[in-house]
Amino acid sequence: MRYAITPQSRTSRARFSLMDETDTVRFTVVRNALSDVSGVELAVIKRSRLRSKADILVAGQAPASVRYEGSRDSYEIVSDGRALTAERDSASGTYTVTQADGTTVATFSQRRGLLHSFDDEIHDKADQVLLLAVMFAIHDIRQGRTAAAAAGALAQAADQS
């Protein structure tokens, strides 16, 4: 299934609409909660105090966690005892989510020129909600790491002046 993910307004980075191939809104994200179109909360992304990890909560339980993996832009996803990996292609900016056997289950990429708009393609037999939540968890972790790096650079520049 393919999704186009766009902010609900130009000023809000915390509200997204997720539309399928027919431009029908299938899900929404408000802050870090993924809901269906009727407003039923399906998953919540909760970033840990460590900037490099987030849990995906469903009905208060954490069936999945996403963790940044060091030197390259990759993430380890653990869900129900299964390990998945999301790796970013540095040339295209596209993330590919694979199972341990190398099977691709999803890809997602940021649209060129549109800071908070994404295209997402998830294998039809895969858990759509989980993988959409994984995409938002990775986005949240990246934003946190980028903000922390920027704050660190500003502090270092202030110390040098």
Image: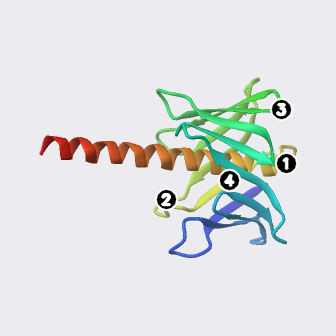
The residue that label 4 is drawn on is: 120
**Gap between marks 1 and 4, in whole Å?**
12 Å
**74 or 49: nearer the eye?**
49
Q: How is the image coloured?
A: rainbow
**Gap between marks 1 and 3, in whole Å?**
19 Å
3 or 4: mark nearer the eye: 3
At numbered mark 3, what does the secondary structure look like: helix, strand or loop?
Answer: loop
- Which of marks 4 and 3 precedes in the sequence? 3
Q: Amino acid at mark 2?
A: Arg
- Which of marks 3 and 1 precedes in the sequence? 3
Q: Are dots 3 and 4 in contact, CB under 8 Å?
A: no
At numbered mark 2, what does the secondary structure look like: helix, strand or loop?
Answer: loop
Q: Position of residue 43 (x, y in %)?
A: 77, 53
- Which of marks 2 and 1 precedes in the sequence? 2
The residue that label 3 is drawn on is: 80
**Gap between marks 3 and 2, in whole Å?**
34 Å
The residue that label 2 is drawn on is: 112
**Gap between marks 1 and 2, in whole Å?**
25 Å
The residue that label 1 is drawn on is: 124
Q: Is the residue marked by circle 2 packed among few (<14), some (14-19), or many (20+) residues within 10 Å?
A: few
Q: Is residue 8 above or below residue 51?
A: below
Q: Are dots 1 and 3 in contact, CB under 8 Å?
A: no
At numbered mark 4, what does the secondary structure look like: helix, strand or loop?
Answer: strand
**Gap between marks 2 and 4, in whole Å?**
14 Å
Q: Amino acid at mark 4?
A: Asp
Q: Is residue 68 left or right of residue 159?
A: right
Q: Is residue 148 above or below residue 3?
A: above
**Farthest residue in the top direction?**
101
Q: Amino acid at mark 1?
A: Asp
